[in-house]
Image (spheres, rainbow, N blue to C red):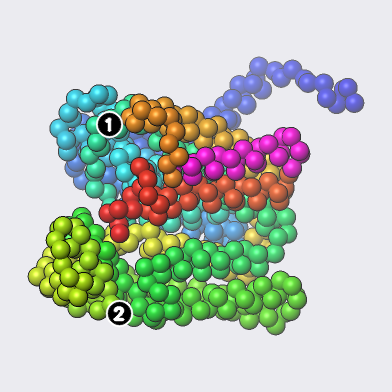
Amino acid sequence: MSQAIKPTEPMVGDIELSFGGKLAGMVPVIAPMLLALAFILSRLYIGPKGLLYEGAMTMLALICYISAAVILVTNLFVRESVLRKLGLWATALGVAFNFAGWMMRWIEAGDAEGWKSGINGIWRYFPLDNLYPLTLGFCFGGAITTLVIIRKEKYQHIGALSMPIVTVILTMAMMLGNAISTLPPILDSYWRPIHVSIATIAYGVCLVSFGLAVAYLLRDGVRTEALAIATALYGVLGVYVWVGHSQVPLSMEYGVSMMMGRSTFPVRATLPGVGPLMELAFISIILALVLFVIDWFRRDAKVNRLAWRLFGVAAGLQALVLGVLFYQLKNINNLAAHVPASALPKFGEWLATQNNVAIPPAQYATVAQSFLQERSADLTISAQSNPVEIGGLIGLFVALVLVALFAWKRERVVSALPQLAQIDGLLYRTVGVAFPLLSLLLITGAVWANESWGRYWGWDSKEVGALVAWMAYAGFLHTRIAHGWRGRRSAYFALLGFALVIFTWLGVSFLLPGLHSYAEPMS
């Protein structure tokens, strides 16, 4: 036994070979960062020529991420070394474009304001002025963490679980709009880039830990029906019921908020054809959910087959929903005529409040109608009208398709994943990175809050959300270290933690009031 555990002294040549091998293994991570640096320096010294601006870089990053997601998922079913390499380098290129675009926004913000000398000089323009650049950083963190992992061949298939999520998040980011915001002087602090940069990278690592948790559960034999039930619940509660918070579910209508310039009005133009398709998809998901629950307890083969067929139908309907929705966003005319009469009184009341004018309630609808008709030529709709809703619809479609594919070729998918011990160890390491980052997030946020608002903690909704997410990952590490929890229980903690991260990043920003909320302009 002593001989077995006695360390042997490696020879110098072995050390050099090992170091060289490790350096060569890091090329897929180092190369895209060098390429990104070249793009950034070119933008700094050449100017916004050709593709050297943030919008172009972000679009190229999205194209690369979509390609990487498709290739890596395909490689789960068609095991080819060329697909592995293509997926790896598509991810690497996406990382380069993502980071370059994110940092180019820094230059563009400074140019837009003339590089005014603030409290912290160039740090005033660091690209974290609103949710859009924060999301660019979030995607970069998730993609580069994925890249670090999938550069090793034994972990190549983990990217098939994380890159689709990165793709959906970056798609939603582009719908948020990339307008540059001017921060109020009270927030002009060097703690801002430190605090929010830590947040973006931490969230990205949490994203990958979520993919690893799903991989562990699949490898450990969790029924695919459990994934289907979770996806159906996400669709019913997280997308359709929430989408209907301003429109009654099963109303057979769906509309998006109208905009004038960059301002969004709390009134929606109904998109023809979208509502009925959404209702059909909603009903299909509910029926599939009910059948999956019945099958879970009864193990009925006929019920199971019918549930999966309905699940597939829901995926197809969701694709139609997105197709018709984006078609209508581009082609609908005369927006004022597409506002439901039932929405006019509430909008008229909002107009009266905004203009501080006393109007009898009976005239609210008339005032609203007149306002819409007078400004009909200036009213617009786009994916930016309701980016979170549309992002949720896209995310649901991706989830439905992936779960259906995993169920269709379950054995093929499971056999492609690393062994349980490897996934469990990698999950532990990613959470071990995410937790101290989330801890630093809370600490630096408290210091920044004290500098800006004169208090370290104010129980703001985002502060509470970040604390709860931190507690979830703290629970993961505590139960593992103190109580020896492994496997499924740890995986469930990772799933919970990422769900709380998503809520902190997006749900708090748009749904709950607070100092960090973006909900007001999206009403």
Q: Find disc 1 in the rendering and name its residue.
A: 186
Q: Is residue 232 left or right of residue 64?
A: right
Instruction: Let me know if residue 464 is in the magenta part.
Output: yes
Q: Amino acid at mark 1?
A: Ile
Can residue 118 be spotted in the picture? yes
Can residue 259 be spotted in the picture? no
Task: Check the image and name the residue furthest to the right.
Answer: 1
Instruction: Locate the C terminus by quadrant.
Output: bottom left
Overall secondary structure of the magenta stretch?
A: helix
Quadrant position of residue 186 = top left
The residue stretch that appears in magenta: 462-485
Q: Nearer the viewer, residue 277 or 13?
A: 277
> Pointer 1 and pointer 2: residues touching (CB < 8 Å)?
no
Q: Residues within 10 Å of mark 2 (few under 14, many from 20)?
A: some
- Provide residue 187's location: percent of width, then percent of height: 30, 32
Q: Nearer the viewer, residue 396 or 120?
A: 120
Seen at 20% across and 31% down, the residue is 45
- Provide residue 408's location: percent of width, then percent of height: 62, 70
Q: Find disc 2 in the rendering and name its residue.
A: 272
Q: Is residue 326 left or right of residue 440?
A: left
Seen at 19% across and 75% down, the residue is 362
- Provide residue 66's location: percent of width, then percent of height: 43, 56
- Provide residue 271's location: percent of width, then percent of height: 30, 75
Q: Is residue 334 left or right of residue 487?
A: left
Q: From this view, report whether residue 299 is shown above or below residue 179.
A: below
Q: Nearer the viewer, residue 225 or 473?
A: 473
Q: Amino acid at mark 2?
A: Pro
Q: Nearer the viewer, mark 1 or mark 2?
A: 1
Instruction: Locate the N terminus by quadrant.
Output: top right
Q: Which element type, helix, strand or loop, lies under badge 2?
A: loop
Label of residue 276 in the image = none
Q: Nearer the viewer, residue 5 or 269?
A: 269
